[in-house]
Image (cartoon, grey):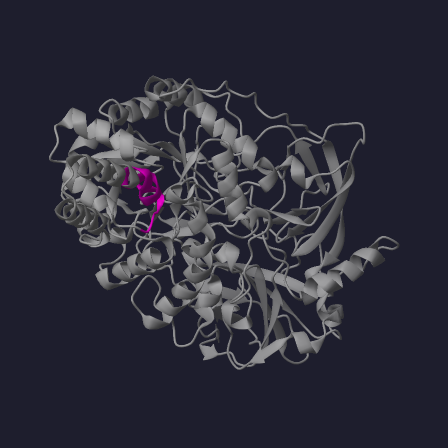
Amino acid sequence: MNRSKSLAATSKSITAMARKRSSKTTLIFFLLLSLLAFLSFLPVFASLPSLPSYSHSHDLHFHLPRHQRLHRRQKISVRKFEIAEDKFWKDGKPFQIIGGDLHYFRVLPEYWEDRLLRAKALGLNTVQTYIPWNLHEPEAGKLVFEGIADLVSFLKLCQKLGLLVMLRAGPYICAEWDLGGFPAWLLSIHPDVRLRSSDPAYLQKVEGWWGVLLPKVAPLLYGNGGPIIMVQIENEFGSYGNDKAYLSHLVKLARGHLGEDIILYTTDGGSRETLEKGTIQGDGVFAAVDFTTGDNPWPIFKLQKQFNSPGKSPPLSSEFYTGWLTHWSEKMARTDADFTAAALEKIMLQNGSVVLYMAHGGTNFGFYNGANTGADESDYKPDLTSYDYDAPITESGDVDNAKFKAIRRVMGKFSSVSLPSVPPNNKKTGYGSIQLKRTAFLFDLLDEIDPLHIVEAESPTAMEYLNQMFGFVLYVSEYVAKTGGSKLVIPKVHDRAQVFISCSPEVNGGQVSYVGTIERWSNQAINLPNVKCVSSTSLFILVENMGRVNYGPYIFDRKGILSSVYVDGSVLKRWKMISIPFHNLNEVPKFNPVIQVASKFHKVSAGKKLEHKSVGVGGPSFYTGHFSIDTKTEVTDTYISLRGWGKGIAFVNEFNIGRYWPTSGPPCNLYIPAPILRQGENVLVIFELESPNPELMVDSVDQPDFTCGPGQASVHQNEDGKASASLLTPNPLGLRTF
């Protein structure tokens, strides 16, 4: 019910009663009775989030002097978060958002409380988090809200710990996360879906996803008793497009599920161009800004006001950068602690609100890291497994550092309550050296794979069309070699292709030889030597998906071989494709023929030495090792150092802890949180693509190490900032070449 109608009805009833009764005493009695009845219902009306009655009360409110307005707001407000007078108001009192991004999907659930408590100790009263669609719907129609994807439990935990939440619902999130949070199966739809647009096919998928997601979070809105004070629509759309119909459709969807009272907001760069394209004026959506740390914030906040309704523009930097992201082969991004704290204080001194990006970065476990591009889609820069971000709370949760202390000092000046004590760093243990054994060579497994699990086609097929979203695809074909050798050209490969050749088993036992690597960022032809096969030569191309682009115009980023393959200028036909998906963060592939066969080989290798088709010790192979934690010893975090290894992925107790590439750097180590480990025996499995440590050894150590590469990098930055390739050695795989 609209409160203005309620007031009018009350007034009419009182007038009617006055006409019917001549007694002054009776009139006073009914007046008092009506007033008491009205006042008794005020809290009820105020608590209903769907009622538009506050619009009327605000009209009355602003006719009063300011001190009376404040008193009135405090008196009638019942659990409400709103914007008025260019301020945020929480339960009738002015409120300064002191927030920070902390992403539940980059932290194991067992550590959510630990990291949130550290965020509170930093001085935060609010947590901001994205929601990655691809984590929750890894396959079309398969919804996951358990384990690390248990969003509701995370939100309830925030509330339990006294933290408010700003929810970034997407559907696009960027976040240095694979495909900007979109599920990769959207790329398998034909005809192509136009992401981030008003394309009906795309919007239909968004409506289905939000139709599941938003009803889950609606009970947790602040007006409904939960911690969520604001919900973000899209993300920095002004840096991408200008489709207002798309943004308005998202607003309509959100309002339909969440009601009219929740504050919807956008985040865009603090320039006129991005704000003009990315804001949703006229729909009651608050426009927040982000900008480079160190920029003068107040001219940007002044510009922000032009894109919000009068009185509806509290200054908010919704991404205040405490550090920055890092790509493979770059130096680890670092920002000065005092500089960062000083820039933060400039905002807060004048009652500006701020959200640290990041308060705690965490880890891109599995295959979910994103990537960026430069001038074109071939200028490809994948992100690290570590998402440390040089944040005040480090990847492993450490807080004993200069940046945490400097930011906490600033936060403490503006916090309305005393800050909690700072917890100590979590203990970490080096569990010593781990001896590994080569348990299977990739090409030894091929003969054992059931032909029913091999896809055949005239031309190479993209990974997504194989119903595979992450991992590797092995492409196999044949060609007739020329006497002087041949030339291989693949115009479009995403992202990194290792090329091998072999003859039939009658020649050299079918030994496989490595001939070179084609990389997306430096695509070059490869010379194929004449191996003098009796008949045709087998060609094997192992393509790695290194993470989909998450930002910019090239986010429609399919993986695998995306063009014809040419040998000596002729198109190569008749291909076989073998999927090698591996476990990802929140899913286990329905069937992985390579892993199934590898498991069988692992059991065989325990009893005898295997004969491999490769010459040397390198090439794509599986290595397995075991290490024990004493049953009387506390299980703590650790790192595994992969110095001396080439490139690959690692699993601990069947959990995909991510990619390693120490020859490119900067990380030498991978972080292993304690909840992955167990007392007794622990199993480490490595899929090494190039060459292992000669001693087949890795070390469990007690600290991070970001000092590998780029001096030895297989990818490095030129002076113009573009990536190029240079092999670590002429033959990094250690395989026989011709």
Residue under the image location 88 percent in, 54 percent down: 607
Kindly tell me whether residue 192 is visible in this rendering. Answer: yes
Asked if residue 240 is positioned above or below residue 705 in the image, the reply reads below
Instruction: Name the residue: 24% across, 32% down.
Output: 73
- Estimate the x, y position of residue 252 in percent, counting from the top left: 29, 60
Q: Pinpoint residue 157: horizontal percent, then vertical percent.
A: 52, 38
Q: Foreground residue, 47 or 143?
A: 47
Tell me if 20 is positioned left or right of 376 in this view: left
Identify the residue shown where x is 65% and y is 74%.
532
The quarter of the image holding the C terminus is: bottom right
**What x and y, as percent, mark residue 123?**
41, 24
Q: Is residue 106 magenta?
A: no
Q: Is residue 276 left or right of residue 633?
A: left
* Majority SS type along the magenta span: helix
Decide whether residue 42 is among the magenta residues.
Answer: yes
**Is residue 273 shown above or below 225?**
below
Region of the chain picked out in magenta, as a range: 38-50
Residue 613 seen: no
Can you say whether 614 is above or below 228 in the image? below
Q: Quadrant of residue 409?
A: top left
Depth check, front residue: 461 or 124: 124
